[in-house]
Amino acid sequence: MKLQINIGKRLGSFSLNMEATVSGERIGIFGASGSGKTTLVHAISGLTAPDSGEITLDGACLFSSRKGVNLAPEKRRIAIVFQHARLFPHLGVKANLLFGYRRCRPEHRKIRPESIIKVLNLEHLQGRGVGNLSGGEKQRVALGRAVLANPRLLVMDEPLSALDDSLRFQIIPYLRSVSEKFGIPYLFISHSLTEMQLMADNVLVVADGNITGVSTPDELARTGMARSPRGYLNLLRLGSAISHDGLFHYPWGDGTFIVSDGRTNGDSLFELSSRDIILFKKHPEAVSARNMLECRVAEMFDSDGRKGVVLESRGQRLVAEIVHSAAVELGINPGSTVFAAIKASAFRRLD
Amino acid sequence: MNLSPQDITAIGLSMKIAVTATILSLPIGFATAWLMVFRNFRGKVLLEVLVNLPLTLPPVVIGYLLLLFFGKNGWGGSLLKSAGISFIFTWKAAVVASATVGFPLLVRSIRLGMESIDRQLLQASRSLGAPWYDTLATVVLPLSFRGMVAGSSLMFARSLGEFGATIIVAGNIPGVTQTIPLAIYDYASSPTGTAMALSLCAVSVALSVVILLLHEVIGNKLEHRNDA
């Protein structure tokens, strides 16, 4: 998917000027609330018309003030998943799912209702009304409804913000797998960097009504490391754990991670702050931290006076954070070997 | 309680007028409410004033204005005459009088219902491929249903009670345009009519209670359906 935007819009005293060209299948739109993210996606999906400019999606003009083009939202084939599912309250689950499918031209109907119902695990909900679904179920139905409209682009407008933490990370695999399995590119809007890291390859950064740059989630996490209250958050998907002495041993790189809050069945997503990793030049013999890993320093980066140290162990990477003087004292340079100590309780299980 | 055949005709006529006025006004009321809630256009304030005017005007004034408009020399009157339709002093005139007086009540209720519809539902519908008219029919209409029920029952009740405008445009002709209130008025002005007037009053009360009950029952049903 290739999206070209060059638009201007005034909303009272707030003025929006957005210009960017971005391509890829998984694009994030990242910015604080009130920065203009929603206005941007509304302009792309045709729900609000910009005052001036042009929007082109895969070469097709959606909006152009110069040519007098403003395609109606129903003609753009851009389906939206809203923050609060927004299911039609007068229709049941099944009718909600099929709302867009029924209105989709037969030649565009590539995704069948049965397949999406299966992927999203909605079989048992089909006969229900939408009033008594849980938050996660509602969001899955909303996602199914959007995908079944067989859109050429899926817009997810903070689809996880209304869900609590554990549910949020249970929905993410659905969001990703649906887009991958059915080949629909998406725009994922969020103010959470963690969500961006999990959902997007490229990110449009929006601030004060402007697109300030195109970046990757990792780059954003690196630049924001020193300023963020929790540093750089390493997201690790770990599996095949063995339980031993009430702790969980997960294979990682050349060694294992010992984690206090794990589980033996299935994969889990863990969050590890760059500030919870202590680096040693030599093996410190005895230490209370349960994890002591020998790693190679793959690269180093600066973030507002702090040093980010990218550790590598058999292809797996982890970012640790140290102050500049520590880097000098320990003589840490790319290529050198260090020992990383991590407490078992520093790993936070997300799903 | 004793009702003369003339009273029974009056009851039937009242019902017929109220039902016709309500049914005819419903689509226009829906369209007007939709315009007021979802569309921005020049002269919106003017439309608002115009729609609500009958609420504040004395019904007699409305009746008189209708009489002028639909009378022999009025625009409406000459138009209907060329179409061969006699209008003034018929039950059709009573329908128009009732519809005019009850219209603001209908629009207000539908509007309240529409205003409570989440705009994002309409955005969802549009982005899922439904053009505005499809969205109107499949999202706005069903979600305004409660407002329409409330508005219809209010309007129906108001029509049953219509007096001032009706007596001017439709007259008080027993068997032709005499509705319950007009019949009560006749009885009240005759010294022997007290018992007859009271019987019709009882019918009025009964009809009002039935309408209010029906309104509650349908309202509750809709609420439960939304919860299911």
Image (spheres, coloured by chain):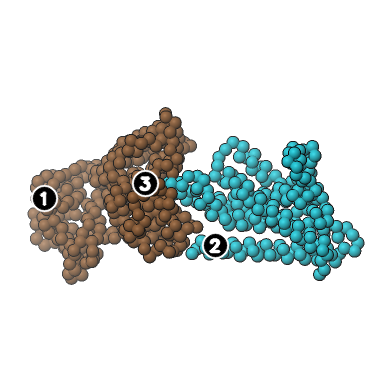
Chain colours: A brown, B cyan
Residue type, mark 2 in image: Glu
Chain letter for mark 2: B
Measuring 73% from the left and 65% from the top, which residue is drawn there?
B206
Residue A202 on image: x %, y %: 27, 43
Measuring 36% from the left and 46% from the top, which residue is drawn there?
A107
Name the foreground residue: A103 vs A204.
Answer: A103
Measuring 73% from the left and 54% from the top, which residue is drawn there?
B17
How packed mark 3 is, by other alpha carbons closer than 10 Å (few <14, some 14-19, many 20 or more), is few
Reading the image, the residue beneath label 2 is B223
Residue type, mark 1 in image: Arg
Callout 2–callout 3 Cβ contact below 8 Å: no
Callout 2–callout 1 Cβ contact below 8 Å: no
Query: Where's the N terminus of chain A, which quadrant?
Result: top left
How packed mark 2 is, by other alpha carbons closer than 10 Å (few <14, some 14-19, many 20 or more), is few
Name the foreground residue: B39 vs A93.
Answer: A93
Residue most extreme to the top: A66
**Of labels 2 and 3, the one closer to you:** 3
Answer above or below: position of A245 versus A314: below
Q: Is residue A172 visible?
A: no
Name the foreground residue: A28 vs A274.
Answer: A28
Disc 3/disc 1 C-alpha distance (Å): 53 Å
Left or right of B81 in this view: A316: left
Reading the image, the residue beneath label 1 is A296
Left or right of A39 in this view: B161: right
Reading the image, the residue beneath label 3 is A107
Q: Is the same chain shared between marks 3 and 1?
A: yes
Residue A331 on image: x %, y %: 10, 46
Assign a secondary structure to mark 2. helix
Callout 3–callout 1 Cβ contact below 8 Å: no
Disc 2/disc 3 C-alpha distance (Å): 39 Å
